Image: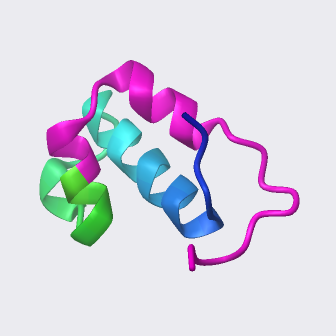
Amino acid sequence: MPAKSKAQQKAAGAALSAKRGETKESELNGAARAMYESMSEDQLEDFAGTKREGKPEHRS
């Protein structure tokens, strides 16, 4: 499932980084923390890998 906004994509990227151990879980806030706790690494890769072209900054 693709990200619907740039903000959602950025949050997924931060959560994915924490899942992989590249950043600390304690550094996550808001949506990124929720994604980290509720989504698998594969799901996060799908969200973070979405093309940014034509996406709004925030989902309406």
Image spot of residue 25 (x, y percent):
16, 49
The quadrant in which residue 30 appears is bottom left
- What residue appears at the point 41 percent right and 27 percent down from the top-left corner? 43
Q: Residue at x 50, y 60 (%)?
A: 8
Task: State which region is magenta.
Answer: 35-60
Residue found at x 20% / y 55%: 34
In which quadrant of the rendered image does the N terminus lie? top right
18 horizontally vs 16: left or right? left
Q: Vertical placement of 38 versus 28: above or below?
A: above
The residue sitting at 76% across, 64% down in the picture is 55
Q: Is residue 53 above or below residue 58?
A: above
Task: Pick the residue in front: 31 or 28.
Answer: 31
**Residue 35 at x, y percent in the picture:** 27, 48
In front of the other: 55 or 22: 55
| Residue 49 relative to residue 26: left or right | right
Report the front residue among 49 and 1. 1
- Asked if residue 51 is among those painted magenta in the image, a careful observer would answer yes
